[in-house]
Amino acid sequence: MSGHSEDPIAEESKRFFTFFNLSMLLVAITGIEIVIIYVQTFDGASIIGVLFATSIVKFVGVVTWFMHLKWDKILNTILFLMGLVIAVFTFFAVIYMSDDPPKVIEFNVASVENDWSADAGYSSGDYVKIDDSYFLCLSDHSSPSPSPTEKSSSPTWEKVNGVPHEFNWKVSTGDLIEINSLKPENPFFHHYNPVVSVENDWSAETDYSSGDYVKIDDSYFLCLSDHSSPSPSPTEKSSSPTWEKVNGVPHDNDNIEGSLISVLEKKASTEDFRIKVRSEAFWVENN
Amino acid sequence: MSEASASAHALDHHEPVTSTGIPNKKVLMWAFLGSDCMFFGTLISTHLIYRKISATVGGNFLDIRDIFDIELTSFSTFILLASSLFMALAVSAIHKGNLSSTRWMLFGTIIFGLIFLACQVYEFTHFVQPPDPQHALTLSTYGGEPHVFGSTFYVLTGTHGTHVAIGVFWLLGWLAYSFTGKMSTADALDIECCGLYWHFVDIVWIIIFPVIYLMEYAF
């Protein structure tokens, strides 16, 4: 690191050219960064990679020559690197600890287009279509199915005003889901909390794996180690390494799937809706 | 001390011997810069994480390019890089005992530092009161909608701007001191410490410019 020559003044004079050349290099690199952004030749990830690399080159250039670390004792480098390394590790630690944003794996909306058939059996809640009219089945029945008619007073079918649509979705994780229409003339809004609580009653005859939850009365227990039947009974005061009592209700909110049938005023498709998923601090939407 | 006598003593200035072999002031400055790294590292991390978490405003993606003026920011980046060259030459000149050159280089660094600050003041004013109020970025809102981007952005770039302002005041002090006739090569270490601080401010901007500004244009 230390590089004092015989003639320090001549050495300082030489540094003039070093500083000037470095300065020109820094300007050139910055210019390249800006051109890359304007031209957008690469994809986003590659651009970030290039910016990251050029920043490191500029950073090292300034620290090494402008800040004289090249000619100074190693202690100065160590002092500076200590803070720098801690800063970099702090950054990656915080990034690592932050939750991954949820992903909308699947989302589709389609109108229900089941043509009524006298030979089919129907269950309560089914929708059928005759010409351009839609009917809701009010009671389970087998074939032959009574024909739905607009003026029917039958307790079997009821004509609906509008078009029944089926909504299906699958998201990676989340604690709140909202679906809303993007068309004001065809309003729709669905908002719900998809968290599913774990309700497995403990059984001595069951095999359990580490991470499983069981319920006894109103208490929940976490399995700490894999074991086969007969399973030791979880108790609140147990000192067993097999079970641990948990405070609160354990929830499962990964890979959430859902579906819904709703009657809309007009026929619509997936593109007419937006699904928003919240997971901790993230809000992700797909439309 | 005259410039001739200053030259005669050029590079003949010896600091007290320390156990590390490095002047204590310099060790202290490097330790401070190391701690300032953590400070800026925290601010940059905070901005990036909240940028990722709060990517939307009012249901739409927050496209901050609507108000960013990348030409202006690029210009101020070049200015700050050029000021670093002046600063390095000022340190080199004082080591050689060339007071006249030191003075001019300090003056150049100050001017470029002031230009950078002026650009930042213009930029902030433009962000808070843009031609289209729908893109106004305040500390707590964007286009009138609550958003965290302004908080992390202004705190980060404002803290950097404050560092630049402190550096300019420090350099102004040295420039004024150079006219008292007391400046000599014995002050080289102090000016070098001032230079370390100024270069540090430069490298922080070297990170901020691509990470906070250019990255917004990557997608």
Image: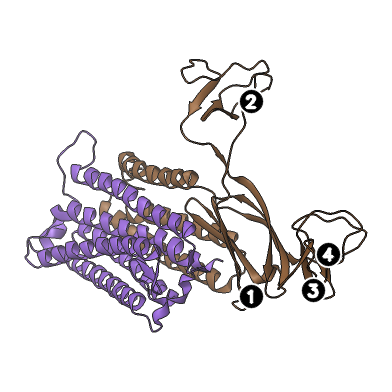
Q: Which chain is purple?
A: B
Residue B128, placed above or below residue B28: below
Q: Disc 2 sits on a residue from what chain?
A: A
Badge 1 amino acid: Asn
Determine whether the residue tagged by mark 3 lies in a helix, strand or loop: loop
Question: How many residues crowd around disc 4 within 10 Å: few (fewer than 14), some, or many (20 or more)?
Answer: few
Q: Determine which of the numbered discs, if any, sits on residue A114 in the image.
A: 4
The residue at the point 43 percent across, 47 percent down is A91
Badge 2 amino acid: Ser
The residue at the point 23 percent across, 41 percent down is B22
In terms of sequence position, does the residue under pointer 3 or pointer 1 come before the other? 3
Q: Determine which of the numbered discs, if any, sits on residue B45 in the image.
A: none
Instruction: Tell me how far mark 3 sits from mark 2, CA to CA.
Output: 56 Å
The residue at the point 42 percent across, 77 percent down is B135
Badge 3 amino acid: Glu
Q: Nearer the viewer, mark 4 or mark 3?
A: 3
Residue topped by disc 3: A150
Q: Are marks 4 and 3 in contact (CB under 8 Å)?
A: no
A207 or A143, nearer to the observer: A143
Check chain identity for marks 4 and 3: say if they share one: yes
Residue topped by disc 2: A209
Question: How many residues crowd around disc 3 within 10 Å: few (fewer than 14), some, or many (20 or more)?
Answer: few
Residue topped by disc 1: A186
Determine whether the residue tagged by mark 4 lies in a helix, strand or loop: loop
Question: Measured from the top left, where is residue B86 in percent x and y?
Answer: 29, 66
Question: Measured from the top left, where is residue B112 in percent x and y?
Answer: 28, 71
Specify the colour of chain A. Answer: brown
Badge 4 amino acid: Asn
In terms of sequence position, does the residue under pointer 2 or pointer 1 come before the other? 1
Total of numbered circles in the picture?
A: 4
Q: Disc 1 sits on a residue from what chain?
A: A
Instruction: Tell me how far mark 2 sits from mark 1, CA to CA.
Output: 48 Å
